[in-house]
Image (tube, rainbow, N blue to C red):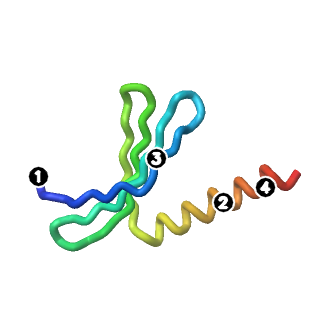
Amino acid sequence: MSDVVRRPLTTLEAPYRREVRLEEVEFESGMIMLRVIVREGHRITQLDLDATTARDWGAAMVAWADRQTDG
């Protein structure tokens, strides 16, 4: 397994006792990605996203949240 440098960004408490953690991860090759870790009880889901995907996902989430508060 290759070495990675992990830099914690934030931890969010989500509904139903879930936790979302964001980390910047730098791989041995120099590639940097955003790691999204979702903890649901004992289950953990981990996604590594490139900057383009993270930006698009973030924009989609902000657009959804804005629609929820506009009404």
Disc number for residue 11: 3
Query: Image height check: is 2 above or below 51?
Result: above
| CA separation in Å, label 3 and label 2 | 18 Å
Q: Residues within 10 Å of mark 2 (few under 14, many from 20)?
A: few
Q: Is residue 49 left or right of residue 60?
A: left
Q: Residue at x 38, y 30 (%)?
A: 43
Q: Residue furthest right?
A: 71
Query: Image height check: is 54 above or below 10?
Result: below
Q: Which residue is mark 1?
A: 1
Q: Residues within 10 Å of mark 4 (few under 14, many from 20)?
A: few
Query: Image height check: is 19 above or below 22?
Result: above
Q: Do the CB atoms of the residues marked 3 and 1 lie less than 8 Å apart?
A: no
Tag 3: residue type? Thr
Give coordinates of residue 40: x percent, y percent: 45, 31
Q: Which residue is mark 4?
A: 67
Report the mark closest to the observer, 3 or 2: 3
Give SS at disc 2: helix
Q: Is residue 17 left or right of residue 21?
A: right
| CA separation in Å, label 4 and label 1 | 43 Å
Give SS at disc 4: helix
Q: Residues within 10 Å of mark 3 (few under 14, many from 20)?
A: some
> Which comes before the other along the chain, label 3 or label 4?
3
Q: Residue at x 37, y 26 (%)?
A: 42
| CA separation in Å, label 3 and label 4 | 24 Å
Tag 2: residue type? Val
Report the mark closest to the observer, 3 or 1: 3
Q: Residues within 10 Å of mark 1 (few under 14, many from 20)?
A: few
